[in-house]
Every structure is written in structure tokens, then in C-alpha cells.
Amino acid sequence: MSSHLVRVGAMGLVGQFRSPDGAIYPRGRRVVVRTVRGVEAGEVLAEPSGWQDAAGADGELLRLMTVEDEMLAERMERRRDEAFAECNKLLEDRRLPVALMDVELLMDGQGLYFYFLGEVTPDVDALTAELAETYEATVQFRKFTNTLLEGCGPGCGTEEAKGQGGCSSCASCAVAEACKK
């Protein structure tokens, strides 16, 4: 297995990600990786070389970003911007003495992270829990991300799957198709 150096997350953390199929991804390419936090977008910083240890990898490099992945990333950015604005408004309304630096929403819709400058008090924790509930728990959004990550079954996205219970006839693919428009 090959192991790439990939930058992930809002804070630009760098880790080793193994490519289970042995594919080599060029530097600068956007990729989808699985980390301990969930499914995230990343950027390849270095191709595999002799010094990297695939056994000590930080996760798996799943694939190059597809058009669908890019579309999902754009949608996540809009959601992230909404969460950032809402959090800042609530911090101001509640007069909490902390500065919001960034918000990060993972590609799988399962993780929402707030980055603050200052002491994170129980009041700030309560506020982020409230926001997480608002921005993470959208069932249709999770269906959409699951479809992009897993598809609807064998041959998903191919002409052969149409009319056989796959793609154009499955409910979650209909959600994904509607979101493309």
C-alpha cells in the first residue's frame, strides 16, 4: 500500500494517508480521505516515497475528488458560512467573551467543528451544541452525502443501473440529482 502526505481540515493538518488500491495521486490534487473524524476533503502534498510508513497512516485516501465531491464541498462551504454567521450572532447576543476563528463541516455531514480564540466556557459549549444540532441533523443532507460517498448499489451512476432499482429510481439518488440543479 502506498502512503501519501495529505493536508486536511480547516487548520491544515498534515498526515499520512494510505491508498488501499496502491494508486499514486499527484501533488496538488484534491482528494477524499477518511480520518478518525470522518470523511474529509484534502490536498496531496507528497506522493509516496521510501520514508513513509503505510502501517502508521492517519487514514485512507479514498479517491480523487469527483465532480459530485466538488459539488458537495461547495454546499458544505455554504453551510459552514451559515454556521459561522449564526455562531457569531449568538456569541454577540449572549455577550460571550470568545472569538470564533473558523467553522468546519466534514464531507460526510457527521462532524461540525468550531474553532475559538479564548476560553471555551460551558456557555460556549452549550451554544456550539445548539448549533451542531441545527447544522448537523438534517436527514436529507445526510442522505445526499451518503449517496455521494457510497452510491445506491452496484453500478451506481452507470446507464446499466437505470431501471434496475439503481440510480434514477432510488430515492437518495433523486435527492442528489435535485441538488445538482
Image (spheres, grey):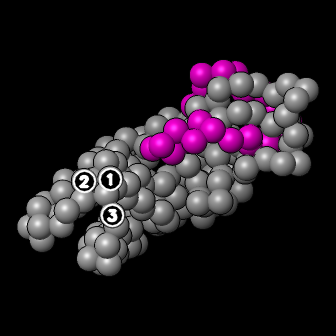
Return the residue found at the far left: 93
Place of residue 68 in the rendered image (x, y in percent of width and height, measured from the top left): 49, 41
**Disc 3 residue type (three-letter):** Glu
Return the residue found at the far top: 27
Residue range highlighted in magenta: 7-30
- With respect to residue 7, does 38 lie above or below? below
Q: Residue at x 68, y 41 (%)?
A: 15
Q: Which residue is mark 3?
A: 119
Callout 1 touching callout 2 (CB < 8 Å):
yes
Q: Is residue 5 magenta?
A: no
Q: Residue at x 27, y 53 (%)?
A: 100
Give the crowd class for mark 2: few <14, some 14-19, many >=20 residues within 10 Å: some
Q: In this image, 115 relative to 40: left or right?
A: left
Circle on res. 99: 2
Place of residue 32 in the rendered image (x, y in percent of width and height, measured from the top left): 61, 43
Circle on res. 141: none
Marks 3/2: CA–CA distance: 9 Å
**Disc 2 residue type (three-letter):** Ala
Mark sitting earlier along the chain (1/2): 2
| Of 163 and 112, the residue lying toward us | 112
Place of residue 73 in the rendered image (x, y in percent of width and height, measured from the top left): 43, 43
**Disc 1 residue type (three-letter):** Leu
Give the crowd class for mark 3: few <14, some 14-19, many >=20 residues within 10 Å: few
Mark sitting earlier along the chain (3/2): 2
| Secondary element type, mark 3 | loop
Callout 1 touching callout 3 (CB < 8 Å):
no
Marks 1/3: CA–CA distance: 7 Å
